[in-house]
Structures are given as structure tokens and as C-alpha cells.
Amino acid sequence: MKNRFIKKTSLIIGFIGLNLISCSDDFTEVTPSGSTSYANFWKSEQDAAEGVNSMYAYMQDEEMFSRGFFWYINASDDMITGRIKAAADNIKNFNITGGEGGYTSTCYENCYKIIRRANDIILNVPDMDISETQKSQFLGEAYFMRAFSYFWVAHTYGDNGPNGGVPIVTEMNMFDPAGSYSRPTSVIENYQQIETDLIKAAEFLPLFTDYGSNDYGRPHKDAALGYLAKTNLYWAQYDAARYVEVVKYADAVTNSGSGRALINSGNPSIDYREMHSSLNNWTSEYIWSVNSGVDNGSKLPGIMLENKGWGKYNGWGYYTPSEGLFLEFEAGDVRRDVTILNFGDEFPFFGETRRYQSENSLSGFMFNKYMYEFQFENPIGTYINSNGDNPSTTYNVPLMRYAEVLLMKAEALIMDGQNGDVPLNLVRERAGVPAISGATMDDLKHERRVELAGEFANRHFDLVRWGDAAATYAKPIYGRIYTDRSNPDSPYTSEIVFPSRNFDPTYMNAWPLPITVIESSGIPQNKGW
């Protein structure tokens, strides 16, 4: 049964969370590191395994990879909040202070809790009397999870000026006095730390194909290599020399020996549809995902589902596609219908064929990409969570796919003055659209948008790092307003569903820190917010 190691986490989370915490609690929780519990914990292989498993609990937290970081992605031109939510609209309008409550308030601190747990492993495991093979596995997982967590807080809250990076807390300084941490002068220092950790993780970790099914969901070599490519891609906005590293690490994923490849049987409509389903949770395309199931996981599928799910399930109705995203797809691109439901589109839902209509959607569209598990006649408890307030499914929501690795390589080649056609066209071929010759950055930007729409690949930060955010957000977002929203054949008009916004890249490239972090740590708020 998949994810067995994840299920153990709930049994140990209280102990790990409350007792294995340093006095440097500004980013996490507090119990003195000198407690008896801490001193006596790192003794056995079981202790180490429990410490490692505890790192994964926050991956399924609602304010991480369900909503959380997705509220920042929701700022892009690809979507609007599908329901009226003042706090959500304030985030999208870049009109926030860091005090938005249960939206983005714990993304930062949850990442540092993972970092804290990784630091404990890196500090204690090397001296434990356990096998070298097991040490390597535990350390590889810790280095990966520390780097992955820093990756998210660094590009979300850090920059190369005026704010700098986010505090670097490692096993070397984790016991420093509370309030003593400062921010590095540039987020580049964070990227350097992340790169160092990921290189170690790649050295320690096995290939995914070397795992037994009970260990599916643990970090593996390709995940470390993939995030080395993405870290360098983000770093390259400040230092173009990093594009060479993007290509190197993207190629390392391809050539790792694990058989990475796109899901491509030659039938584009079926391939792209089934690729976004639990059928392919552990296949060649998925580099890193949120382990999910009917008991827990990423809530994103239910969050994107029609509000109240047409009376069948407690969909939340958030994150609805814009007309601009719908129109971005080329004629014949099978990805459009898999990605988006448009009025009148047929789709299977709870054992019936429905035609899409919505009396709730504020844009007139709905993301279809996460809907596969809702098609079955009796999916509750088998494919989807029986608790509609925790609407996970058996689909592991992707954080990085092999398609993105290919597109990162294509982008790096184009930005480095070389030809990126080969990796770009692999992605296009799977979608059933013609190959491009002499691909430009405009081609690359289009391809990232349509291939990765509605995913954690992060359209908003793409616009930021390309320098396109101000011009893009100066245009309003359109949706389709139907005269009879209960009728899938109703006529519509294209109307503004979210106004133009003033995006100031002198400070808005980094989001504001949560107020709770500032109050507990003493580090300054990002300038301008």
C-alpha cells in the first residue's frame, strides 16, 4: 500500500514537533533543546527513521501545497479566485501586509519547521551506530527536504535587493540565541546553500527505480537533480552564467538511469488526460509530488472543484481559469480541454456524463486537470476523501514533472543563445501540436503557460523573473459571463472579472513576510509592504 511511511508520521509528529526543537524557535516552535527527550532521542535506527518521517507532515498541510503557496500563484493572469474572498483578492491585488490569517500566514514558518527537522537529522545521524547505507538514505532525505523548503521560502520572500534573502539556519548555527538570525544580503546566498544541499542529496539518494513500493514518495536522485535545475533557473535571473547549470542538471535527470520520459503513447488526448491522474502517480513523468490519498494529501483537487460540486461533493470553487488562459491554447492542442472546462464541455462526474455549466464560477470556467478521480460512480472513500473539508484524492498533485525539466532546458538554451527546439518540441509533440523551428523566448513562455497551467510550477513567479509581471498585470483579466448560468448552451459576453493591477517590481517581486514571523524573529519586513 502506497505511502506507508507517511502514515506513521501522525503517530510521531507530536513527539518530534514538541521535543526536538532548538532554543532558536523564531521560525518554528519552542521547547529547549536540552530537554531529556531531545538528549535521549537519537539513539536507534527507529529514532532516526521517525525523525526523517516527521519532515513530510507539512507537505500535506493546507497552507503549503493545497492552498498556501497557491494563493501566490493565484496572483497570475491564468486565474482568479472563483468565489468572493476579500483576503484572497487583496493578495491578488498585491495589497497585503503579511497579516492575512489562514491564507499564507504559515507557509514560511512551516518551511522552517521542516528545515529544523532536517537540521536535527544532519546533526545527529552521522554519529549514530547504524549502517552506512541507512545513514546515506536518511541524510539524503534531510538534505533534499532542507533544500526544497529553502527553495520555496527563498524565491517567495527573498530577492537580490532591496530585501536580500531569507535567514539561513543549518545544523551549524541552529542553537544560536533566539532573535540572532539575520538575512543574507541577496537571495543568491540562499540559492548557493540550496545548490550545496541538493548536490549532497543527489550523491546520497538512490534512483526512484531502486525503491520498493513502501518507500514511494521519498526523495530520490532525480528529484534532487530536478530542483538543482530549477534553483539555477531562478538564480539565472541575476546571473546568466547559471543557464549552463540548468542544462547540465536537466540532462542529468534525463540520463540518470531511471528512465525519465513523458507519458506519450502517441495518443495525445488520452496521454495528457491520464497523465494527470493517479494512474501515473509513480511513472516516468513525475519528479516530485504531494503524496495524496483518500485519507490525506493535497486538497487542491477539491479546492478547484465547482463550489458544492453540483450537489455531489463539497468542492470549494477556488482558482478558476481566466479567458486569457483558455485562449492561449493553439487550435488542436489537446491540453486545453484536459486543463479547462468550458460551458457545454462534456465530462464524466460521479458515474454520469455531464455538460459543464456553473452557477458559481466567477470566470465561467473550471480547472479540469485534477478531475479524473471524480469521474467514477462511487468515488468517495475509494478515489476521493470522504471528508469534503479535506478534499484530497488518490492523485499525487505534481510539484515538478519531467515536462517542466524539458522546458527548463529549452529556456536555458534559448537564453544562452543556443537552440532549444529539441526539448521544447518533445513537450509539443505529446500535446499533438506542430513542432517549432528556431524557438524564441515567446515560444517558450507560451509553452510553459499551457503545459503547466494550474500547477505549482508557478506562473506568477515566471512573470516576475522574466520581468513581465508589471506589463501583464496592467491588463485586466477577462472571463465569460453567461446570461443563464444553469444552461450549458447559454450565450455569454467576455467581461472583466478582475481589474488591472499596479505591480511595482521595485519591491513586489518578493512577497511580504507573515507578521507572526516578524514579531517572533525580529527580522525586518520586506520593504514597501
Image (cartoon, rainbow, N blue to C red):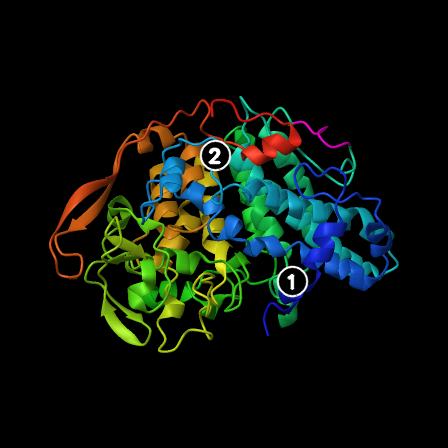
The front one of 447 and 174 is 174
In the displayed structure, does residue 136 sit left or right of residue 297?
A: right
Foreground tag (2 vs 1): 1
Q: Please say whether residue 220 is visible from this viewpoint.
A: yes
Label 1: few (<14), some (14–19) or many (≥20) C-alpha neighbours in 10 Å: few
Instruction: Please name the amino acid that badge 1 sits on.
Output: Ser
Label 2: few (<14), some (14–19) or many (≥20) C-alpha neighbours in 10 Å: some
Residue 517 got which mark?
Answer: none
Q: Position of residue 52 (x, y in %)?
A: 71, 57
Tell me what residue is drawn at x 41 percent, y 37 percent.
91
How many numbered circles are shown? 2
Name the residue carrying label 1. 10
Tell me what residue is drawn at x 41 percent, y 55 percent.
426
Mark 1 or mark 2, which is nearer the start of the sequence? 1
Residue 486 is one of the magenta-drawn residues:
no
Q: Which residues are magenta?
A: 177-182
Quadrant (top left/top right/bottom left/bottom right) for the N terminus: bottom right
SS label for mark 1: helix
The front one of 480 and 325 is 480
Q: Quadrant of residue 45?
A: bottom right
Q: Please say whether residue 166 is visible from this viewpoint.
A: no
Instruction: Please name the amino acid that badge 2 sits on.
Output: Asp
Kindly report the distance in space between the C-alpha atoms of the residues bearing marks 2 and 1.
Answer: 47 Å
Name the residue carrying label 2. 416
The front one of 413 and 11 is 11
SS label for mark 2: loop
Vertical side of 33 occupied by 286: above or below: below
